[in-house]
Image (cartoon, rainbow, N blue to C red):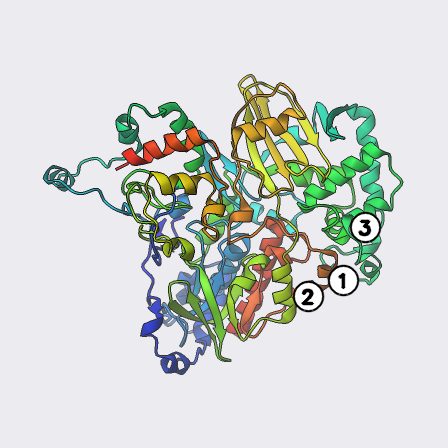
């Protein structure tokens, strides 16, 4: 990776003459952009544009700036959505700058070193029924790891009235499987086209239901009900009375309405070289500039372009901006003109995903275990073995309490001992996304009343576009959703600027 | 990431709790030590002839004998997820922490410290480090370290011992 000094440099606010900013006019150099698009369509990169020149004249050098703006496109956020959006606009020949607030790429993915190995502290799983991310896996030939222990436990232990109960998996799983299937019985009718969630009006029948409301409609044994609550609460990463029923129904429909694919999708396949390998692949495949440690404080439109002000007062101008930062953080940026009331209100309310995730290593080999608890127990709803052997077991645990002390060995050990009384924990770690002001939570599950707002949350406001995974259509809250939004929005912006 | 044009950005300020997240993506953002130790004639001369950078190895060797080295090492595993510690190493998700003891908060280069930390006026000593490390979100609401804290007093003490020697 090479370091390239930005040209032109971002200017300090005190150095900017507002009149000069407006005089620049933000006019697109359409010819240059078109040349770039042709090159992209023919499989070449921007540097190949000269070879595509119809007159066999040397193509003009592509300038560092696009027309009167510093950049054609500024992408805000360096996660899956941001990296894919930047790739799309860059490959269309548009000068593109990606601004990332943190001093790392990845957004709510974070492949980080822990001791002698790396762990995924954020988003982790992908599946071949997630069309956008799987296209990237194919495109960049990314290797995949299979962690089958997560879907083939030898022991299933759940908390009931504060006590550990060991299930007979052979007889208990079919009951829970049936309960999940019954919970989602109407999935094909409501979402006959999962990529187009509003294709019919069937969803309106269920729009007011929480996850808990739907569970309560089913006639279930207590232990099955408890575990259904555990499963859906952790999938939504919030108490079942908060998340919208339609959100989980959509996952089920996306996966062909069956529990085998559902289980595989939520806890089995991951990128061998970490989520960062895909981020890097997408950005390596572009000419976008990337600037880290660049929190944005203001996004102002004047009808002919956009001025982005960074937290330290520096400014940059662009013809169009793609905001890929999390929904929960939109309210922390000053937009001029102000965002629509729906966007602001939804950002203030937040989506419901706000729990914890921790990686624990036990001293003993505790085998392939699956641990569950309902949403009345904050620290963990869903835990399972990733790897196990004579050297100990690595466990991945998800809970609803985002403030749970995931990094405290004693606290985590005591929590696990409620399931496994003799377990000894050697190490534990979790990134506390709730404390990260650039995420303010984990993955997006919308509240019941927020479901119908998705089209408005996705709607561009002038030259500012929105492309977070939090507002994706199909795999909202997933890496796939980030890429869905990044690619589709990047293409919309590219078409608008190139034409 | 050969094609990635990574711009070393915008700097804002300085320290917080150190930084080293092995992220290859951050290799370009070199972070000078927040507050270099006073240069004696000798170490200045060493620098001129390219003396090896100091860092964790030396800090463990030189930390006070009364400190719990083993506990510091264990506790540090969590810090190393996001922080670098050796002099001259780039910031990671969090800033490089070499020389943090005795330095002003938010004083490092090329790192977007939170406004609340920049404006805190804190100097990192035993007392401020102890309070911050125990519960960062409570001690300094609005800071950007996504870490709930080291609740164990002995673990904090060992870490602070190590940071004291990291100069």
Residue carrying label 3: A187
Residue A157 placement: quadrant: top right
As drawn, the label of residue A455 is 2
Residue A155, horizontal then vertical, whole percent: 71, 23
Left or right of residue B38, residue A253 in this image = right
The residue nearer to you, when weighing A269 against B20, is B20
Number of disc labels: 3
As drawn, the label of residue B42 is none
Residue carrying label 1: A198
Label 1–label 2 contact, CB within 8 A: yes
Residue at x 53% of width, y 59% of height = A85
Residue A209, horizontal then vertical, whole percent: 80, 54
Near mark 3 (Cα within 10 A), the count class, few <14, some 14-19 or many ≥20, is: many
Label 2, label 3: how far apart the Cα atoms are: 21 Å
Disc with the residue nearer the chain's start (1 vs 2): 1
Location of residue B75 with respect to A424 vertically, above or below:
below
Label 1, label 3: how far apart the Cα atoms are: 13 Å
Label 1, label 2: how far apart the Cα atoms are: 10 Å
Location of residue A323 with respect to A436 vertically, above or below:
below
Near mark 2 (Cα within 10 A), the count class, few <14, some 14-19 or many ≥20, is: few
Residues beneath discs 1 and 3 located on the same chain: yes
Q: Chain letter of disc 2?
A: A
């Amino acid at each position: 990776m090479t370091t390239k000094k930005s040209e032109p440099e971002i200017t300090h606010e005190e150095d900017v003459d507002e009149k000069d900013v407006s005089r620049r006019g933000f006019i697109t150099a359409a010819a240059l952009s078109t040349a770039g698009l042709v090159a992209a369509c023919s499989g070449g990169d921007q540097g190949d544009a000269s070879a595509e020149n119809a007159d066999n004249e040397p193509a003009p050098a592509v300038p560092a700036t696009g027309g009167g703006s510093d950049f054609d496109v500024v992408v805000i956020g360096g996660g899956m959505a941001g990296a894919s959006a930047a790739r799309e606009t860059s490959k269309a020949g548009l000068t593109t700058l990606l601004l990332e607030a943190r001093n790392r790429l990845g957004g709510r993915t974070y492949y980080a070193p822990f001791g002698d190995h790396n762990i995924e502290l954020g988003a982790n799983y992908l599946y071949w029924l997630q069309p956008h991310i799987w296209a990237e896996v194919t495109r960049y030939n990314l290797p995949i790891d299979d962690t089958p222990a997560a879907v083939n436990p030898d022991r299933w232990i759940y908390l009931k009235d504060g006590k550990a109960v060991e299930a007979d998996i052979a007889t208990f799983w079919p009951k829970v499987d049936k309960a999940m299937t019954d919970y989602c019985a109407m999935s094909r009718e409501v979402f006959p086209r999962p990529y187009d969630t509003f294709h019919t009006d069937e969803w309106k029948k269920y729009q007011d239901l929480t996850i808990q409301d739907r569970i309560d409609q089913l006639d279930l044994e207590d232990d099955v009900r408890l575990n259904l609550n555990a499963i859906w609460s952790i999938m939504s990463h919030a108490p079942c009375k908060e998340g919208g029923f339609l959100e989980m129904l959509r996952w089920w429909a996306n996966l062909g309405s069956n529990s085998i694919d559902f289980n595989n999708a939520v806890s089995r396949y991951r990128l061998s070289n970490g989520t960062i390998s895909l981020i890097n692949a997408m950005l390596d495949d572009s000419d976008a500039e990337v600037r880290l440690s660049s929190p944005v404080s203001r996004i102002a439109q004047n009808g002919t372009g956009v001025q982005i002000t960074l937290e330290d007062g520096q400014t940059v101008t662009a013809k169009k901006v793609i905001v890929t930062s999390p929904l929960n953080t939109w309210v922390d940026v000053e937009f001029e003109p102000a965002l629509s009331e729906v966007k602001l209100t939804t950002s203030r309310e937040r989506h419901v995903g706000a729990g914890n995730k921790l990686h624990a290593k036990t001293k003993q080999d505790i085998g392939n275990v699956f641990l569950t608890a309902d949403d009345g127990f904050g620290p963990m709803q869903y835990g399972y073995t990733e790897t196990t052997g004579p050297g100990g077991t690595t466990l991945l645990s998800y809970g609803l309490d985002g403030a749970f002390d995931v990094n405290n060995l004693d606290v985590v050990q005591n929590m696990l001992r409620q399931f496994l009384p003799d377990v000894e924990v050697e190490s534990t770690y979790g990134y506390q996304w709730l404390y990260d002001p650039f995420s303010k939570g984990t993955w997006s599950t919308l509240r019941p009343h927020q479901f119908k707002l998705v089209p408005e949350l996705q709607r561009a406001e002038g030259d500012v576009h929105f492309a977070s995974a939090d507002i994706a259509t199909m795999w909202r809250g997933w890496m796939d959703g980030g890429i869905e939004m990044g690619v589709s929005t990047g293409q919309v912006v590219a078409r608008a600027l190139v034409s | 990431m050969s094609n990635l044009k990574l711009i070393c950005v915008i700097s804002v300020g300085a320290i917080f709790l150190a930084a080293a997240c092995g992220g290859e993506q951050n290799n370009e953002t070199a972070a000078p030590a927040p507050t270099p130790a006073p240069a004696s004639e000798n170490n200045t001369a060493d620098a001129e002839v390219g003396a090896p950078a100091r860092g964790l190895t030396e800090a463990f060797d030189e930390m006070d004998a009364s400190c719990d080295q083993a506990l510091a090492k264990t506790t540090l595993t969590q810090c190393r997820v996001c922080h670098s510690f050796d002099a001259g190493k780039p910031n990671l998700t969090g800033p490089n922490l070499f020389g943090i003891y005795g330095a002003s908060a938010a004083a490092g280069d090329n790192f977007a410290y939170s406004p609340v930390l920049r404006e805190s006026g804190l100097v990192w000593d035993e007392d401020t480090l102890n309070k911050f490390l125990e519960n960062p979100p409570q001690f300094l609401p609005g800071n950007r370290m996504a870490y709930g804290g080291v609740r164990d007093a002995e673990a904090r003490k060992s870490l602070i011992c190590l940071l004291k020697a990291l100069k």
